[in-house]
Image: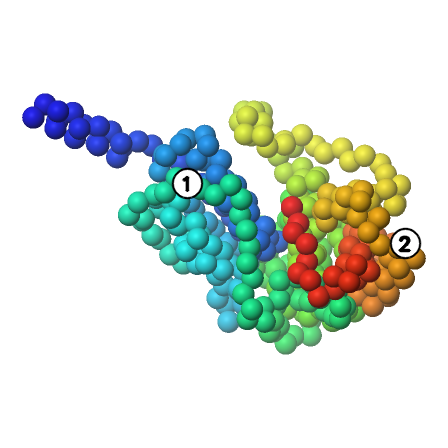
C-alpha cells in the first residue's frame, strides 16, 4: 500500500513538472522552410536543455494571407503539415491560429536533422532561373492600380504601428517586393514597410521570396530594435543571446559587400566560383541583370541586387537552372 502511495505521488509530481514553452511568430518575410527550420531547432534545444519535459509550442502568423483572406500555402503547410503532422509527436501541446491540440504522449527521440521533401504538385519553391520570369508570392493578386495605404500594409504585416521591418525606424516608405517595372502588382501582399535607408538597400529583383529572404537577413544583420530599451530588459535579452547594442557595419568596397552577402545570405563558399568558367558566369550574370532586375532610386548598382543576380547566374552556368533554389540560412 505504501509502495502504491509513493508511486501515485511520483506520478502526481511528474504531472506537475513544469514544461517548456516554445514560441515562434512566423513573420511575413519568413517562408515555410525558414520558419520550419527555426521551430525545429528550438524544439531540439528544449529537449537538450530539459530532457523529457513537456513541450508546448505556440505559433503565430503575420501576413501570409491569400486573396480570399485565408492563410497562404506557406502558413498552412507550416501549421498543418509540419507542426501538427511531423512535429506533433514530439510535443505535449500545440497552439496555432487554426488548431489547438493536446497530444496523448510526447516522444523525445527527436531527429538530429530536418529534411525537406517537396510534393510533385506543381508548387513553386524557388526562383525559376531557367525562365528568368517574375515569381511573386501572391498567385492571384488583387487587381488595383494604386498603391495601398501605409496603414493597410501595416495591418497586413501585423504591425500595430507602421515601422521599418528591419530596424523599427520611422517614418517608413512603401517598398515594392517585386518592382512594378518587373511585373509586380499593387496588391498589398506585394509591399513591405522600410525606412528610407533600408528601402534604398533592398533588392530590385523579379523574385518575391528572395526579397523577403533579404529582409530576414538584414533584420538579423543590423537591427537596432533594442538599442533604446531599459537597462534591465537589455540585461535579460543579453542573457538569452539577443544582441541589444547598436550595430556597427564594417565599411566595405562594393564588390567586397557583394561577396559578403553571397556568403552570409546565399551560402556561397570559396569553392563555388571554381565550379564554373569565369567567362560563363559573367555572361549569365549580365543576362540575369538585364532580364530580371530593375533600378530604383536611380541607383545604378545595389549590393543586394548584384548578389542575387550572381547567385542566379551561378546556377544557370552550372546547369542547375531547373533545380530547386539552394537552402538559405
Return the disc, 2 or 1, that comes first in the chain's sequence.
1
Residue at (56% x, 69% y) in the render? 120
Percent from the top left, x then y, of residue 91? 38, 44
Whether residue 261 is visible: no
Q: Quick check: 206 left or right of 48? A: right
Residue nearest the observer in this picture, 312 or 153: 312
Mark 2, secondary structure of its residue = helix
Total tally of numbered discs in the picture:
2
The image shows residue 296, relative to residue 47, as above or below, that is below
Percent from the top left, x then y, of residue 259? 82, 44
The residue that mark 1 highlights is 109
Between the residue at mark 2 and the residue at mark 1, the CA separation in whole angstroms equals 47 Å
Whether residue 110 is visible: yes
Percent from the top left, x then y, of residue 129? 75, 65
Residue at (89% x, 41% y) in the render? 253
The residue that mark 2 highlights is 278
Q: Within 10 angstroms of label 2, few (less than 14), some, or many (20 or more) residues?
A: few
Residue nearest the observer in this picture, 248 or 193: 248
Q: Which mark is residue 269?
A: none
Furthest residue to the bottom?
143
Residue nearest the observer in this picture, 234 or 147: 234
Q: Quick check: 234 left or right of 259? A: left
The image shows residue 240, relative to residue 208, as above or below, that is above
Amino acid at each position: 500500500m505504501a509502495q502504491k502511495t509513493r508511486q501515485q505521488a511520483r506520478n502526481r509530481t511528474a504531472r506537475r513538472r513544469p514544461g517548456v514553452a516554445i514560441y515562434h511568430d512566423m513573420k511575413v518575410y519568413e517562408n515555410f522552410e525558414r520558419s520550419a527550420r527555426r521551430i525545429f531547432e528550438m524544439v531540439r534545444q528544449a529537449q537538450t536543455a530539459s530532457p523529457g519535459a513537456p513541450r508546448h509550442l505556440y505559433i503565430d502568423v503575420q501576413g501570409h494571407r491569400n486573396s480570399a483572406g485565408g492563410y497562404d500555402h506557406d502558413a498552412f503547410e507550416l501549421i498543418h503539415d509540419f507542426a501538427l503532422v511531423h512535429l506533433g509527436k514530439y510535443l505535449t501541446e500545440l497552439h496555432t491560429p487554426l488548431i489547438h491540440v493536446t497530444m496523448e504522449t510526447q516522444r523525445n527521440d527527436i531527429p538530429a536533422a530536418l529534411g525537406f521533401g517537396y510534393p510533385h504538385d506543381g508548387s513553386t519553391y524557388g526562383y525559376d532561373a531557367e525562365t528568368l520570369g517574375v515569381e511573386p508570392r501572391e498567385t492571384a493578386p488583387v487587381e488595383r492600380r494604386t498603391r495601398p495605404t501605409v496603414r493597410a500594409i501595416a495591418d497586413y504585416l501585423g504591425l500595430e504601428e507602421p515601422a521599418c521591418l528591419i530596424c523599427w525606424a520611422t517614418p517608413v516608405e512603401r517598398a515594392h517586393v517585386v518592382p512594378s517595372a518587373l511585373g509586380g502588382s499593387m496588391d498589398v501582399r506585394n509591399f513591405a514597410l522600410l525606412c528610407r535607408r533600408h528601402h534604398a538597400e533592398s533588392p530590385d529583383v523579379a523574385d518575391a521570396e528572395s526579397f523577403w529572404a533579404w529582409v530576414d537577413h538584414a533584420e538579423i544583420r543590423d537591427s537596432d530594435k533594442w538599442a533604446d530599451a531599459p537597462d534591465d530588459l537589455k540585461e535579460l535579452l543579453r542573457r538569452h543571446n539577443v544582441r541589444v547594442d547598436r550595430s556597427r557595419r564594417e565599411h566595405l568596397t562594393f564588390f567586397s559587400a557583394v561577396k559578403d552577402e553571397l556568403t552570409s545570405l546565399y551560402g556561397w563558399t570559396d569553392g563555388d566560383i571554381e565550379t564554373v568558367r569565369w567567362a560563363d558566369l559573367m555572361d549569365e550574370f549580365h543576362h540575369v541583370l538585364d532580364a530580371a532586375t530593375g533600378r530604383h532610386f536611380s541607383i545604378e548598382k545595389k549590393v543586394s541586387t548584384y548578389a542575387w543576380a550572381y547567385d542566379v547566374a551561378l546556377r544557370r552556368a552550372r546547369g542547375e537552372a531547373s533545380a530547386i533554389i539552394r537552402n538559405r540560412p
